[in-house]
Amino acid sequence: MVCDKCGKNPAVIHRITTINGKKQELHLCKECAMKEKGMLADDSFSINALLSSLLDMGMETPIKIEKLETAKCSQCGQNFGEFRKTGKLGCDACYASYRDRLLPLLKKIQGNIQHSGKIPKRVGSSLRVKKEIDSLKEELERAVRAEEYERAAELRDRIKSINKSNKKEG
């Protein structure tokens, strides 16, 4: 696909806008995109820049900024301030060294701090059942806290039913 403006170069930026229900597409080469108002053709984007910018988004921390900058990893010696600037950790021990500071960031990015991953269909039935039960237990706790006792009873019965049928199979 060639650029809609110059008609010469290959289009590398594709903008689709919908205004009053009408879809408009614009395909631009890098040079024309830089000239276009409201378009940004920046090669400097990186996931590291995104991570480091998230650290500066008003995250409340009980640790003073000076201590964040000077706390160092016991293995590689990288300080947390360097991670804040680059978005890159120095080694695998940095995860343990900065655990308390990384968990809120991971939760903000992923929505959870525990990796869930995918479960293979052929061999993951018991793991899938365990995850379902764990999820139901969490929902049960929320229902009890919210004093939704009928919902809590339904969830409790569902958990018992799953456990019972799982024991018959196993």
Image: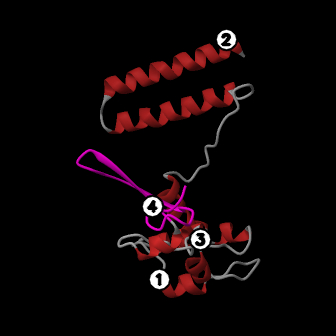
Q: Crowding near pointer 2: few (<14 within 10 Å), some, many (20+)?
A: few
Query: Dividing the image into 4 quarters, which one contains the C terminus?
Result: top right
Label 1, label 4: how far apart the Cα atoms are: 52 Å
The residue lying at 75 percent from left, 79 percent from top is 76
Q: Position of residue 12 (x, y in %)?
A: 54, 62
Residue named by callout 1:
64
Q: Position of residue 35 (x, y in %)?
A: 42, 76
Foreground of the two, 111 or 44? 44
First in residue order: circle 3 vs circle 2:
3
| Dot placed on the residue nearer the N-terminal end, 4 or 3 | 4
The x, y position of residue 61, in whole percent, is 45, 73
SS of the residue at dot 3? helix
Q: Which of marks 3 and 1 is nearer the N terminus?
A: 3
Distance from Cα at disc 4 to Cα at disc 2: 65 Å
Provide the residue designation for mark 2: 168
Is 98 drawn above or below residue 25 in the view shown? Answer: below
Mark 3 and mark 1: Cα distance apart in space:
23 Å
> For the magenta stretch, what is the residue range?
1-28
Q: How far apart are marks 2 and 1 (CA)?
A: 55 Å
Q: In this view, does 14 lie to the left or right of 168?
A: left
The type of residue carrying mark 2 is Lys
Mark linked to residue 48:
3
* Foreground label between 3 and 1: 3
Q: Do the residues labelled 2 and 1 touch (CB within 8 Å)?
A: no
Evaluate if marks 4 and 3 touch, with contact meaning CB atoms under 8 Å apart. no
> Farthest residue toward the top?
168
Count neighbours of disc 4 (C-alpha within 10 A) and say few if under 14, some if 14 to 19, many if 20 or more.
Answer: some
Amino acid, disc 4: Asp
Q: Where, by quadrant of the figure, is residue 126 drawn?
A: top right
